[in-house]
Structure formats: structure tokens, C-alpha cells
Image (cartoon, rainbow, N blue to C red):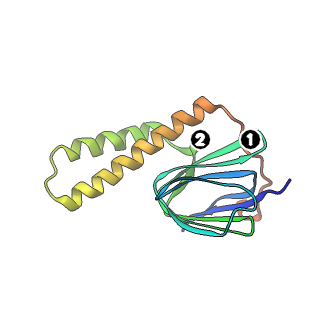
Amino acid sequence: MPTLQVAVVTGEKEIFRGAADMVIAPGTEGEMGILPEHAALLTSLKTGEMRIKLGDAEDSLFLSGGFMEVYNDVVTVLADAAEHSEEIDASRAQEARQRAQDRLANVEDERERARLNGDLARAVTRLRIVELSRRRGTRRIQRLPSTQDE
């Protein structure tokens, strides 16, 4: 059975590299599923959850925007920011959500309102991903350590 080769990177580090049966990504036009032999695609991504599935295992990632290219069963994601669901600090995300809500109540500048709405959306998305990952209870995809990890 064919698989996809998936790489998720940010400007700072590689978040994921490995095989997958399916990738579900938060496209700006809606959630999209990518299977082997998918047509070539280049799209922008919005803040949301990216799921990478292989057999009965799954990795759940938080993405804060970016781009995704699909070509010849290779999925490359260049994310503005990304982290594995188990790396999300829920208490820190809760504090960020509260801070953004408190500041939004008193803001008058539209640019600041837009920035705070973005902060709020990222915090809420992180909290939602943590909760969904706990509910799913799926096991993580096992990968061999890369030379970059050494």
C-alpha cells in the first residue's frame, strides 16, 4: 500500500518527518485530507490542527499558519509555528486566552484588536487540540531518531 512522505518544518526546527497513510490539514478554504496519489497542490494553511495518520497511530500538531505543498506523494509543510499536541502547555494557553480576552474588552485600536483576536484564536486552538488529543487517546507514530536529534 502506498504512503506519503511528510515533512513539517518551521523556521527554527523540523517538527515531523516520516511516512503517513493520510494527512488532514487546516487549509484557509477549509479542512483538507491528503491521501497517496493526491493531485499536486500548493495551498496556504490557517491556524488549526494537523493530523498525520499511519496505521492505527496518529500525530496531532498545532499549526499557526503556513503553506503546504503536495507533489508525488511528498507532503511538505512550511509552518509559521508548530508543535506536537503533547508539547502544548495547557495552563500557558489558558493564561494566553484569558489575557487576550481581558485586553480585547478595552481595546479601541483596530490593529491591536486584530492582533489580539489572532492571539485569542491561537490560544483557543491550542486548548482544543489538547482536549481532542486526550479524547482520541491514539498512540503516536513511532519514528527513528534523525541525525538532527543527536
Horizontal placement of 32 versus 17: left or right? Answer: left
Q: Amino acid at mark 1?
A: Ala
Disc 1 residue crowd, few under 14, some 14–19, many 20+, Cα 10 Å: some
Horizontal placement of 22 versus 84: left or right? Answer: right
Say which residue label 1 marks.
57
- Outermost residue, right direction? 1
Work out whether mark 2 precedes mark 1 in sequence or the reverse, and give the earlier one.
Answer: 1
Say which residue label 2 marks.
86
In the depicted view, which residue is nearer to us: 108 or 14? Answer: 108
Horizontal placement of 138 versus 12: left or right? Answer: right
Q: Quadrant of residue 99?
A: top left
Q: CA distance from mark 2 to mark 1?
A: 14 Å
Residue in the image at 30% along x and 51% along y: 117
Q: Position of residue 110 (x, y in %)?
A: 19, 59
Q: Is residue 150 visible?
A: no
Q: Position of residue 7 (x, y in %)?
A: 67, 62
In the depicted view, which residue is nearer to us: 46 or 98? Answer: 46
Label 2 residue SS: helix
Tell whether label 1 touches label 2 (CB within 8 Å): no
Horizontal placement of 117 versus 85: left or right? Answer: left
Q: Position of residue 123 (x, y in %)?
A: 40, 45
